[in-house]
Amino acid sequence: MGSDDQRTVETFTMEHGLGGDASDWVHDLQSELGEVSKEILKTTEYGEHRIDDVEFDEDMAREVGDLYFSLLGLANELGIDLGQALTTVLDKYENRLQESDTAGSGR
């Protein structure tokens, strides 16, 4: 199943009795995304500085790592191979770019 990272998270969560059902992982994702957003706001002094003009510290790396862990856990719970999912979405964006010069869905 999935990438090396997915297998690592699967092993870790099994060894330590972590995880849960898909809704638990979604809640974790929402929480961790909020933490990433908080770090962005804090680092940019709530929009006083452009995000491109600031450097993020190890707190941001940890929060993005937490977000990634939760995404891997959700994918594992749903039986989704994230490597394959990425290939599929890149193909979709490539097709859109060829057809309309934008990767967006136009919705």
Image (cartoon, helix red, strand yellow):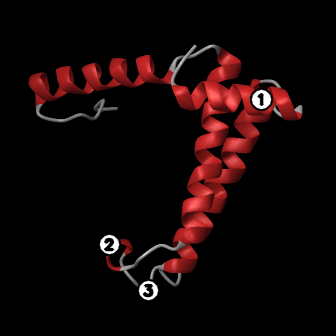
Residue 51 numbered mark, or none: none
Density class for disc 3 (Cα within 10 Å; few <14, some 14-19, many ≥20) is: few
Secondary structure at badge 3 equals loop
Residue 3 position in % (x across, y down): 51, 24
Dot 1: few (<14), some (14–19), or many (≥20) neighbours within 10 Å? few
Q: Alpha carbon of mark 2 to alpha carbon of mark 3: how far? A: 12 Å
The secondary structure type at the circle numbered 1 is helix
User: Which residue bears the numbered disc 3?
Assistant: 48
Viewer-proximal residue among 63 and 99: 63
| Residue at (66% x, 21% y) in the render | 76
Q: Nearer the viewer, residue 104 or 5?
A: 5
Residue name at image x 74 percent, y 43 percent: 28
Real-space Cα separation, disc 1 to disc 3, in angstroms: 36 Å
Q: Is residue 81 above or below residue 52?
A: above
Q: Mark 2 packing: few (<14 Cα in 10 Å), some, or many (20+)? A: few
Label 2, label 1: how far apart the Cα atoms are: 34 Å
Q: Position of residue 33 (x, y in %)?
A: 61, 52
Q: Which residue is mark 2?
A: 52
**Res 22 → quadrant:** top right
Kindly identify the amino acid type of the residue bearing the numbered disc 1: Ser
Tag 3 or tag 1, which sits nearer the N-term? 1
Badges 2 and 1: C-beta atoms under 8 Å apart? no
Q: Within the image, what quadrant is residue 41 found in?
A: bottom right
Rendered-image quadrant of the C terminus: top left
Give left or right: position of 84 versus 93.
Answer: right
Total numbered badges shown on the rendered structure: 3
Disc on res. 23:
1
Sequence-wise, which precedes: disc 2 or disc 1? 1
